[in-house]
Amino acid sequence: MSPELREKLSKLIPRLSTDQDGEIVGTVLAIGRVLKSESLDFHDLANALTVRDPMLGPAFYYSYERKPKPPKPGLYTREGFLRPWEQVAEEILERHRTVGKRYGGKFLLPHQIELLERIRGGLEQGHVHEGMLKIIDDRMRTAFDAWQAEKKGRAA
């Protein structure tokens, strides 16, 4: 149905709610003429009311199936370099072993360590856990930086 036809019908259909029988009949005849001008009939109108037009209205926006985004190949560092998920998991696990609690390290829980081991071995996809890995990586990098800063301070 064209937008012009929809507009005309949207003005006529509310007129059917009157108590005057003659006005109802006149409105039905007017709707019939408007439909006929576009080579349509009441069956087409009924079909248009029951079958959703996939390209119109808010129903289209909410029912639209978006294409899934391709999985990210890895995590970006603060400097903008892309590291594969296996490398991210390896770095986090290595820092977990080396950085002490005093600097903010050794905070991983057993299930997180197990997940990182699976990602490192390629048994688990890293992009599925991207949000968590970003947080852990950032926290581990901060702890590593604090540890390195103290090591430099002692050496000087």
Image (cartoon, grey):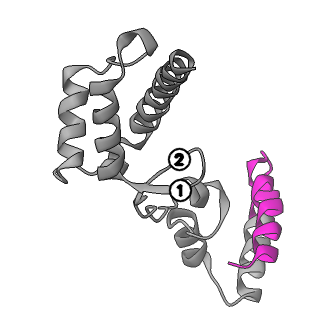
The answer to whether one can see residue 13 in this image is yes
Q: Position of residue 49 (x, y in %)?
A: 57, 64
Question: What's the residue at 41%, 43% (across, down)?
Answer: 130
User: Quick one: 4 or 63, which is closer to the camera?
Assistant: 63
Q: Is residue 94 above or below residue 84?
A: above
Residue at (78% x, 79% y) in the render: 34
Name the spot of residue 80 as percent of width and height, x first.
59, 53
Label 2 sits on a secondary structure element that is loop
In the rendered structure, which segment of residues is drawn in magenta? 1-26
Name the disc covering residue 77, or none.
Answer: 2
9 part of magenta stretch: yes
The amino acid at mark 1 is Phe
Q: 125 or 63: which is nearer to us?
A: 125
Q: Quadrant of the N terminus?
A: bottom right
Q: Which mark is residue 28?
A: none
**Label 1 with label 2: CB-CB less than 8 Å:** yes
- What residue sits 82% from the left and 58% below the top? 23
List the residue tagged with mark 1: 81
Residue situated furthest front in the rendering: 156
Residue 18 inside the magenta-drawn segment: yes
